[in-house]
Amino acid sequence: MKAKIITLLFITLLISCGSREEKKKEGFSYKKKETTEKTVAPKAEKTPPSKQIDLTNKGVGPIKSVSLAAEVDQTMAAHGADVYKKMCTACHRTNKKFIGPPPTGILERRTPEWVMNMILNPEQMVKEDPLAKELLKEFNGSPMANQGLSEKDARAVLEYFRTL
């Protein structure tokens, strides 16, 4: 009887162990995903209009030709400095970007005619001159105000810019 019980127990144990498939324990695994992003070459940075050099464009306006002497006319430059301080410093700083671009080094990037036309005729320049249009965009759509300067005052301001 004892042998029958042990045999029955043994058969039950074999049936219970053998008839089931063992489930594998799933452990933590990390599979690296393939990159779906494509490497793109960086775009060449575009030079902002205020840094672009264009020494051929004379702009749009009354000034067609300006002759600059080799030496700066200090009297005219002093007058230009006074005009600049009174009329232009609300929007321009000589050495840093403000509401408008800084005039320092402007004659290394623009023709004297373009500078004077921008001073005397900013509305038409922004409408018709491609560079003036781009500058308007660069400086957040802030148009240069027409200060109503005479050609003599604008020429004096230009002479002052030569000293910066």
Image (cartoon, rainbow, N blue to C red):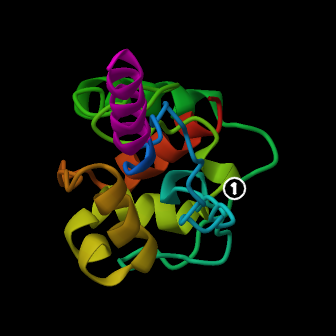
Q: Is residue 10 positioned above or below 111 on the image? A: above
Q: Residues within 10 Å of mark 1 (few under 14, many from 20)?
A: few
Q: Position of residue 70 (x, y in %)?
A: 82, 47
Amino acid type shown at disc 1: Leu
Image point 56% across, 55% down: which residue?
33
Residue occupied by mark 1: 68
Q: Position of residue 77 (x, y in %)?
A: 55, 32
Q: Position of residue 50 (x, y in %)?
A: 51, 52
- For the magenta stretch, what is the residue range? 1-17
Q: Is residue 15 magenta?
A: yes
Image point 45% across, 37% down: which residue?
26
| The residue positioned farthest toward the right in the image shown | 70
Image point 37% across, 24% down: which residue?
82
Place residue 35 in its image quadrant: bottom right
Q: Position of residue 3 (x, y in %)?
A: 42, 22
Magenta stretch mostly in which secondary structure? helix
